[in-house]
Image: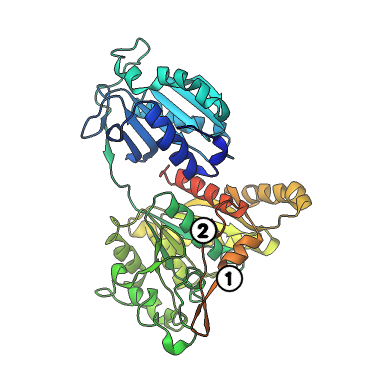
């Protein structure tokens, strides 16, 4: 089989076309000697291959020599990921690590507590230099190494057992300023995370139900056909003993693979005061999410743009927080309210023995693509966030693009009726810049929450 780096347009294709279809077979690794998306504690590896296979998988001083392989998006700079690769190799006592974005292939070797580059080539050179790679990390080459001289001494009690699942991570997406791209972020980030093999649940906690619409759950044209009224997030919050998440959840084909969604409803508005007066109401979502902790990897909660009860419930239940913002004056000023809200929520979380929210950062969202703005104004606005408000700014940027609007406006005809049929931008135009931006956001989020 031949390899052409130009055929790899995203991270998934780097994994499938370069690593799975080309490198692993060339290096002599059979399906029973390599594993994809394997986790050790809070470390998740793209690929781990073994010179000899052992079950159960244990990484320690006596483990068979192994190789970590990490795939990155073709537009990613590999330099940004070397430090993380070093942590993988040194923490797990693994001898070699290969990292690639298809445009470039690098191999690092662990030497004591450091790593050093031992091979690099461009994707175009791969086929003519494959023998060098086989010599370094081919299965037969590693099997012939019994006790390498530069193998560092490793404590015998350093053992990491692979886990098939990590703890479910709950992420709230919140800003008390509306119109900042919150729903767009939630639904397309959910799609990007799903495409990376995560089991994703989306919860809509906003009475405007924008996420419910955006994930295509509103399949009726008249309120008399409303099939969400009798089973939505309101019912989960109203009952301690009934309406579990598994009973209320809906499948959404908004993206492929599909995701699960807990829909919202406009009726949330009229029940807020009633729910707020109940002693158990703030804890119900925590308890019901605990019941499905083995079913999902990541939960994304869309929140109302306010400081109300529903926003509080979301932040109490969440482990992490993303704050989308268009970085305009009113949104920036709103960060003061957000910080104060987080402080109050964390006070309650402390009382119930739950860890405080970890803020992943402010996500620049709905950003103009005007060249001069991007070159001159945007860097200043980004720099102002940590300086003025003491909140980290995320590396990812979501720009305002036509594809994001078009994919949300897709419809289907049911008889003579137009029914909304939105689709994620990653499915609408997989090769678009907007799609790549959400892929990058997903990678950043996974890294920050310890899933990458």
Give the label on residue 303, or none: none
Residue 102 appears left or right of 402? left
Which residue is at the far bottom? 224
Q: First in sequence: mark 1 or mark 2? A: 1
Callout 1 touching callout 2 (CB < 8 Å): no
Answer above or below: position of 81 versus 260: above
> Residue 271 placed where, x, y %?
42, 82
Rendered location of residue 437, percent (x, y): 58, 51
What residue would you read off at disc 1? 409
Q: Is residue 411 visible?
A: yes
Q: CA distance from mark 1 to mark 2?
A: 14 Å
Location of the C terminus by quadrant is: top left
Is residue 391 visible in the rendered structure shown here?
no
Q: Nearer the viewer, residue 424 or 348?
A: 424
Residue lying furthest top in this view? 149
- 336 up-or-down from 451: above or below: below
Q: Is residue 209 left or right of residue 49?
A: right
Residue at the spot of label 2: 427
Near-viewer residue (233 or 103): 103
Residue 250: x and y in percent read 37, 70
Query: Residue 337 occupies which quadrant of the picture?
Result: bottom right
Q: Secondary structure at mark 1?
A: loop
Q: Quadrant of residue 34?
A: top left
Q: Secondary structure at mark 2?
A: helix
Give the residue at x 40% y 61%.
Answer: 259
Which residue sits at x=37%, y=22%? 138
Q: Nearer the viewer, residue 268 or 405?
A: 405
- Location of the N terminus by quadrant is top left
**In terms of image quadrants, where is residue 350?**
bottom left
Q: For the residue carrying disc 1, how many other residues have a C-alpha within 10 Å: few (<14), some (14-19), or many (20+)?
A: few
Badge 2: how crowded within 10 Å, few (<14), some, or many (20+)? some
Color style of the picture: rainbow
């Amino acid at each position: 089989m031949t390899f052409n780096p130009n055929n790899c347009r995203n991270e998934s294709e780097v994994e499938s076309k370069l690593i799975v279809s080309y490198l692993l077979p060339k290096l002599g690794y059979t399906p029973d000697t390599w594993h994809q998306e394997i986790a050790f504690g809070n470390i998740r590896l793209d690929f781990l291959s073994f010179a000899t296979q052992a079950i159960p998988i244990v990484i320690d001083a006596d483990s068979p020599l192994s190789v970590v392989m990490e795939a990155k998006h073709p537009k990613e700079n590999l330099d940004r990921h070397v430090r993380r690769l070093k942590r993988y190799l040194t923490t797990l006592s693994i001898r070699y690590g290969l990292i690639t974005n298809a445009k470039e292939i690098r191999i690092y070797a662990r030497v004591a507590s450091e790593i050093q580059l031992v091979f690099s080539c461009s994707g175009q050179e791969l086929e003519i230099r494959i023998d060098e790679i086989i010599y370094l990390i081919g299965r037969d080459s590693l099997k012939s190494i019994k006790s390498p001289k530069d193998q560092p001494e490793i404590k015998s009690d350093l053992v990491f057992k692979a886990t098939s699942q990590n703890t479910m991570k709950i992420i709230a997406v919140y800003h008390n300023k509306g119109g900042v791209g919150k729903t767009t972020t939630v639904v397309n980030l959910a799609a990007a995370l799903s495409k990376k093999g995560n089991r994703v649940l989306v919860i809509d906690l906003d009475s405007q139900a924008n996420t419910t619409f955006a994930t295509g759950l509103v399949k009726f044209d008249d309120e008399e056909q409303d099939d969400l009224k009798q089973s939505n997030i309101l019912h989960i919050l109203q009952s301690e003993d009934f309406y579990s998440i598994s009973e209320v959840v809906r499948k959404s084909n908004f993206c492929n693979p599909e995701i699960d969604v807990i829909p919202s409803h406009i009726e949330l508005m009229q029940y807020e005061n009633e729910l707020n007066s109940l002693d158990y109401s703030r804890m119900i979502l925590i308890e019901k999410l605990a019941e499905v902790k083995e079913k999902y990897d990541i939960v994304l909660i869309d929140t109302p743009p306010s400081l109300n009860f529903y926003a509080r419930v979301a932040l109490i239940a969440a482990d992490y927080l993303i704050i989308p913002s268009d970085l305009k004056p009113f949104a920036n000023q709103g960060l003061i309210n957000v910080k104060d809200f987080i402080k109050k929520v964390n006070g309650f979380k402390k009382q119930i023995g739950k860890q405080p929210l970890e803020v992943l950062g402010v996500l620049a969202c709905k950003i103009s693509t005007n060249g001069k703005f991007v070159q001159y104004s945007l860097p200043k606005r980004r720099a102002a966030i940590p300086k003025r408000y003491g909140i980290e700014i995320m590396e990812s940027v979501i720009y305002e693009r036509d594809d994001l609007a078009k994919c949300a406006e897709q419809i289907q005809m049911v008889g003579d009726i137009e029914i909304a049929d939105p689709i994620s931008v990653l499915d609408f135009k997989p090769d678009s810049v907007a799609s790549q931006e959400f892929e990058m956001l997903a990678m950043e989020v996974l890294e920050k929450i310890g899933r990458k």
